[in-house]
Image (tube, helix red, strand yellow):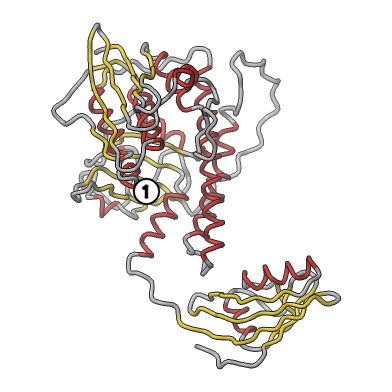
Amino acid sequence: MSAPERIQVEAQSDGEDRLLRADEPLSALQIRCGGTIPGAIAVPELRELVSKARGFGLKLARPIIAQDGQETIRAWIEVTPQEGGCLIILRHWQASSLPPEPADLANRRRVEIDRALAELTARLDPGQRLMTVDALAGDLAQVAQAMRGGIGRPWTDFVDVPGSGQRQPLHWRLLDGATVVVPGSQRVWRATILPQTGPEGETLGFDLCLTSDQPLPEPAEPAVAAPSPPSKASSVIGREMAPVLRQPIARIIANAETIRTRRAGPLTEEYAGYAGDIAAAGQHLLTLIEDLSDMEIIEAEGFAPAADRIDLADVARRAAGILGVRAREKGITIHAPDETMHLGAVGEFRRVLQVLLNLIGNAIRYSPENSAISVLLTAGAGRARITIADQGPGLSPQDAARVFDKFERLGRSGDGGSGLGLYISRRLARAMGGELSVEGHQGQGARFVLELPQG
């Protein structure tokens, strides 16, 4: 309810930026924003100005705009430092009702939060069959391992959906939001199914997110054991350390996304932008941890990918489908092999998919808007080859010679890369008996060629 304009609204804060007293309607705004009197200033815009005035010891004055979830408040504020706190004066107080939210905004926020909070994510094809799986929590390791060994099977083969005796998988709308029981975990999980559609509205597949409102139980204190001998492989992040780091960073990202999408309450665009920066930085750090963990695995003695018989054309179509949304955001068209094309090869399915996701993802990142990326298949001399060709800036001979080096980013900064993707991809290609190379010239785009034994 809008308050009538008053000549002056006064308040007093202490040396810890707590509101000691306040006239109406500021006192009501403080309470609606979750604060108390006396108590910490609950209006972010007011708290920031009071903190600056107190810290600088200077009188500050400016207009502010605040929200309480129902109204937008506009006022002129003057903050004068005093001994032990600040005198706060607001003039020209005006309140107006917030416009109604779009009907689908709540659903979009739910999707964003579920993505950020998910402790297991999987990419599904249009038949809800598993394509890729990634898990963060330790109590999901068992089901994640089973899912990775069952690529191509329905995801519901690996969990229990209570109360459903029908043939699985059900229609995705019936499974979206369903409670699931995960083998190896004592927590209650909720499934979120997010359809991915093409330009004509066709279903390209789904993203599966498993979230839980219960925190991961604290592990029992391990028994003291003799120190292990040092590993011959370099240990950068440690297989034991990576899961420990993933969960708190994922929580940071989730909390930042909650703030950015204003699910926790109203916030100005400036602060929402700060939260978005925090989420992006957290995601970059999480990607770096994953890359370091992958690097340790592939550099370990005895690392040997599975020798699966795969259809390289099918893996290429899946990779292009996964990255289709990102490409369309830049107006980029991915020309993937059509459904009639097939090319047998020998290599571990998920590792080949990992390499192609890295190559196509790089092509999207460095290609200009409204360009095209071609995914080409060739075979000969017992080798199956797939080429990712883009219309980006290309590589000089000097850059092409070092693009596969560890931590090499060719002088780029701010693109979110770790400098490990191509290094890991080449190591994987060679571990599968193949090779990864680059062709092309500066100014003429790049052509990355993945070569595997033909099957």
Q: Position of residue 162 (x, y in %)?
A: 33, 50
1 is higher (above) or lower (below) than 101: below
Q: Nearer the viewer, residue 197 or 368?
A: 368
Q: Residue at x 37, y 65 (%)?
A: 105
174 is higher (above) or lower (below) than 440: below
Q: Residue at x 46, y 42 (%)?
A: 185
Farthest right residue in view: 83
Q: Position of residue 175 (x, y in %)?
A: 29, 51
Q: Nearer the viewer, residue 382 or 54?
A: 54
Q: Position of residue 385 (x, y in %)?
A: 28, 17
Q: What is the tally of numbered marks visible in this picture?
A: 1
Q: Residue at x 42, y 24 (%)?
A: 395
The crowd level at tag 1 (other Cα within 10 Å; few <14, some 14-19, many 20+) is: many
Q: Amino acid at mark 1?
A: Val
Q: Nearer the viewer, residue 90 or 153?
A: 90
Q: Is 28 situated left or right of 142 in this image?
A: right
Farthest left residue in view: 340
Q: Quadrant of the C terminus?
A: top left
Identify the image quadrant of residue 40.
bottom right
Q: Is 113 situated left or right of 246 in this image?
A: left
Q: Residue at x 26, y 16 (%)?
A: 345
* Mark 1: secondary structure: strand
Residue at mark 1: 180
350 is higher (above) or lower (below) than 9: above
Q: Is 427 situated left or right of 372 in this image?
A: right
Identify the image quadrant of residue 29.
bottom right
